Image (spheres, rainbow, N blue to C red):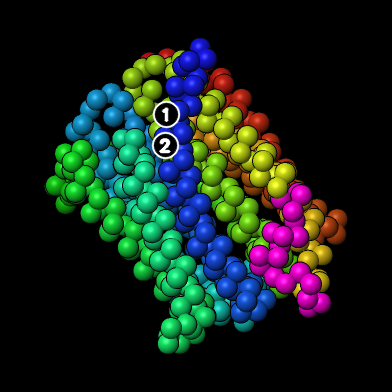
Amino acid sequence: MQTSIRTEFREFLRLAIPLASAQVAQSATGFVDTVIMGRLGSEILAAGGLGAITFTALLNTISGVVIGVSPLVAEAYGAGCKTRVEQVARQGLWLSLLLAIPVMFLLGNIDLLMRQFGQQATTVALAKTYLDIMLWGLFPALAFATLRSFVSGLSHARPVMVIVIGGTLFNIAGNYVLGLGKLGFPALGLRGLAWASILSLWGMFLSLVIYILKHKKLKAYRLFENLHQLQLPIFRELVVVGAPIGVSAALETGLFTVVTYLMGALGTVVLAAHQIVLQTIIVIFMVPLGMSFATTVRVGQWNGQKNLAAARQAGYVGIGSGVVFMTMMAIALLVFPQQVIGLYIDVRASENASVLTLVMPMLTIAAVAQILDSVQKTASGALYGLKDTRVPMFISFCTFWGIGLTTGYLLGFHFGLGGTGLWLGQSIGVAIAAGVFLWRYRQLSLSKSW
C-alpha cells in the first residue's frame, strides 16, 4: 500500500506541479495588475479591481464548462480510445466559441449591472474602460482552457506551464510599459493593462496550438482535422458533464464577486482593502486549483481503466496534498501580514492608515479559511474525475450562496462588522462546502460500480 501511494503521489506531482505552476503564473498577472493599480491611486485600484473580478468571474464560469473536456479525455485515454479523445477535444473548441460570443456581449454592457449594485459613477466608468478591451480576450482564454484540458488529460502538462509562464512574463512587461508609460509609450493606465492582457491571452493560445501541431505524440491525435464538424452527441455529452462544473465555478466565483460588489457599497476604502486580500488569496489558491485539475485527471484515468480502488486513492492523495500546502501558506500569512500588505501599499504612509486597519482582520480570516478551501476544491476535482458534477453543483449553491452569502450579508450589514463580516460569512460557506464535498467523495468512491 505504501509503495502504491508513493507511486500515485509521484504521478500526481508530475501533473500537479506544472498545472499549479501555470495557474500561479497566470494569476501573477492579476497580482502585478493590482500592484500597478495601487501605484496609480486608490480610485484606480478600486475600479480596476472591480473590472478584473467581474471579468474573472465570467471567464471562470464558462471555463468551467469547457474544463469538462478534462475528465472525458482522461477517461478515454485511460480506456485507450484515441478516436474519442480527438472528438471530445474538437467539440470543446466549438463550445469555447459558442460560449464566448454571448459573454462578450454581456461584458460590453456590464456597466448597467454595476450601477444597479450601487457602485460609484467614476468607479463604473473606469471599470468599463478596462472591460471594453478585455472582452476580446475571452475566446483565446476559453480555447486555451480547452487545449490545456486536452493535453493534461493525456498527461502532457509541462508545456502548459512553460507557455503560461512565457505569457505571464510578456503580460507583466506589457503592464509595466503600457500601464505606466515606459520605453517611449504613453501611460495608458487601465487601458494599457487590458491591452497587455489580451495580447498575452492570444499568444498563449496560439503557442499551445503550435505545440500540439509539432509534438510527435500529440499531433497523432489529429485534433485540428475535420474541425468544422459539429458532432452533436459528443457535444451534448460535453455540455452535460461540463455545464454543472461551470455552474459550480459560477457559484463559487460569484460569491466572491458579489461580496466584492457589496464591499464597494461600503465605500472605496473598504473595496481597496478587500482587493488587497482577495488578490493575495487568489495567487495562493492557484496551487490547490492546479492540484484539483491534476486530481481530476488522475481519478479520470483510473476511472477509464475501471480501477475504483486506485481512483479513490488518487483522490485522497490530491486532497491531502492541498491541505498540506495551504496550511503552510496560512502560517506564512499569519506570521508576515505587514510584509504581504506592503506589496500593494506603503504601510507607513498616513493616507493608507484606514486601508491598513481594514485589511488586517480580513487577511487573518482569509488565511485560515484557505485551508478548508483547498479541501473543497481538490475534493470537487476528485468528484469530477468520476464524472459526478451535478450533485456538487447543488452543494455549491447551498453552501456558497445559501449559507456563505447570507451569513456574510447579515454579519457585514446588520451586525456592523462591515468588510470583515463579509469575509467571515463567505469563509463559513466555504468551510461547510469542504466537509460536504469530502463526505460525498468518500461515499461515492466506496459505492460506485460500473
CA gap between label 1 and label 2 equals: 7 Å
- Amino acid type of the residue that numbered disc 1 sits on in the rendered structure: Glu
- Magenta segment includes 342: yes
Q: Residue 200, can we see it? A: yes
The foreground one among 226 and 192 is 192
The span picked out in magenta is 333-351
Residue 15 is labelled as 2
Q: Secondary structure at mark 2?
A: helix
Q: Are marks 1 and 2 in contact (CB under 8 Å)?
A: yes
- Where is residue 433? Give x, y as percent: 64, 37
SS label for mark 1: helix
Taking the image as drawn, is residue 252 in sight?
no
Residue 238 lies in magenta, yes or no? no
Residue 275 marker: none
Camera-nearest residue between 307 and 213: 213
- Residue wearing tag 1: 11
Residue in the image at 53% along x and 26% along y: 317
Q: Position of residue 35 (x, y in %)?
A: 60, 69
